[in-house]
Amino acid sequence: MASLNRAALARLRSVLQSHIDHQRIPGAIAVVALGDHVEMFESLGRLDPAAGTTMKDNAIFRVYSMTKPLVSLAALMLAEEGRLQMGDAVSKYLPEFGSQKVAMEEGGAVRLEPARREATVHDLLRHTAGLTYEFLGSNAVQRQYEAADVVDRSRTNAEFCKVLAAIPLQDQPGSRWQYSRATDVLGALLEVVSGQPLGRLLQERILGPLGMKDTAFSVPKDQWHRIAEPFANDPETGQPVTIMDAREVPKFESGGGGLMSTAPDYIRFLQFMRNRGTLQGARLVSRKTIEWMTSDHVGSIAVNGDLLLPGYGFGLGFSVRLANGLAPQPGSRGQYFWSGIGGTSFLVDPAEDLFAMLLTQAPNQRIFFRNLFRHLVYAAVD
């Protein structure tokens, strides 16, 4: 088994501290684990730069899209119980998605054509359902997402789906990988299958059993002092930083990006994934389900955008590394990872029996620090 170079871990810490000292990010928590042991847990910088408070080990972060793996896991748990199947049409549970059209832009005009097939649960999990994200561009469909304010947190998950389904698809289902609001739709679908709000389903089936006691769609008032905050203004552009209100109790429990969590909580999820479906004797899903979840499900399907790095595919909630080379950072075939737009990221490397996580609240700096952190982690692997 691999070992970790202590001097390289110390360098990882000092590099992050240097960026904090130079006001690139307000603070961070860095975690590196080998086997079942956390080798590094460093809380650096400030929890709240406006108040000047020191980063706490139990700080609560907006993890945004690191919500997706948990919601994807819930779907696979229900599939193991025979309560849904990957080939089921989304419209079986959410009928409003049953007669969607696809927007075709031609010479500045938009023509609608029928979907050649309906999107399935599998399409939602792997982001091939024909949906998109409004912040990834400005095509006709993305402009309609913006105009409909699909991000409005005052709508329920069911109401969100009514609004989204009334907007044409960007792509034919199954034809293209496009990072999207598919996991938000999946969260609403799981509410129909389970008969529970998404937050309660996650609590009863995953968060409670794994001991993730501080992970939820909002932060209770008596814990507001633990919320990690970004700079008020971006250090590079000077523009105000806009970030989700962790104190608000939203009606929209976003399966794609609504959770708040802590380093200790998310470590427990990563340990569960490292153990292929079990933690401290409690098995939530089978080993084969985890192996399937963390395998590539894109294959030869065309990929839109640059979110999937060279050498990577996408599984059911994670990006999955397909080659030791090609990517701009070191890693191993079979590694999987994802991140959040607020500045959080993780990776799990089964080949090295390694996992690592960086939590910060710095939206515009997230890609730089995700890539930097990954390189520094692998520099510590002996």
Image (spheres, rainbow, N blue to C red):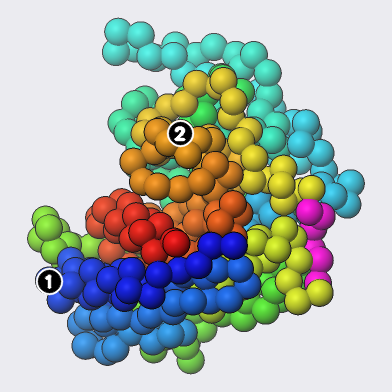
Which mark is on residue 196? none
Between 131 and 31, the one lying in front of the other is: 31
Q: Can you name the residue that lies furthest to the right here?
A: 82
Above or below, 16 relative to 41: above
Above or below, 312 relative to 80: above
Q: Which residue is mark 2?
A: 311
**Residue at screen point 26% across, 82% down:** 46
Q: Answer with left or right where residue 91 lies relative to residue 144.
A: right
- In magenta segment, residue 217: no
Q: Which residues are magenta?
A: 282-287
**Screen quadrant of the N terminus:** bottom right
Q: Answer with left or right where residue 324 lies relative to residue 212.
A: left
**Residue at screen point 46% across, 33% down:** 311
> Label 1 amino acid?
His
* Residue 134 horizontal/vertical position (percent): 38, 39
Task: Count every numbered label the image shows and give the total.
Answer: 2
* Residue 282 horizontal/vertical position (percent): 81, 72
Separation (CA) of disc 1 from disc 2: 33 Å
Above or below, 20 relative to 325: below
What is the quadrant of residue 21 in the picture?
Answer: bottom left
Residue 292 in sight? yes
* Residue 236 horizontal/vertical position (percent): 12, 58
Which mark is first along the chain, 2 or 1?
A: 1
CB atoms at circles 1 and 2 under 8 Å apart?
Answer: no
**Residue at screen point 39% across, 64% down:** 380
> Label 2 amino acid?
Gly
Neighbor class of circle 1 (other Cα within 10 Å; few <14, some 14-19, many 20+) is few
Q: Which residue is mark 1?
A: 22
What is the quadrant of residue 224 in the picture?
Answer: bottom left
Residue 155 in sight? no
- In magenta segment, residue 285: yes
**Residue at screen point 47% across, 18% down:** 103
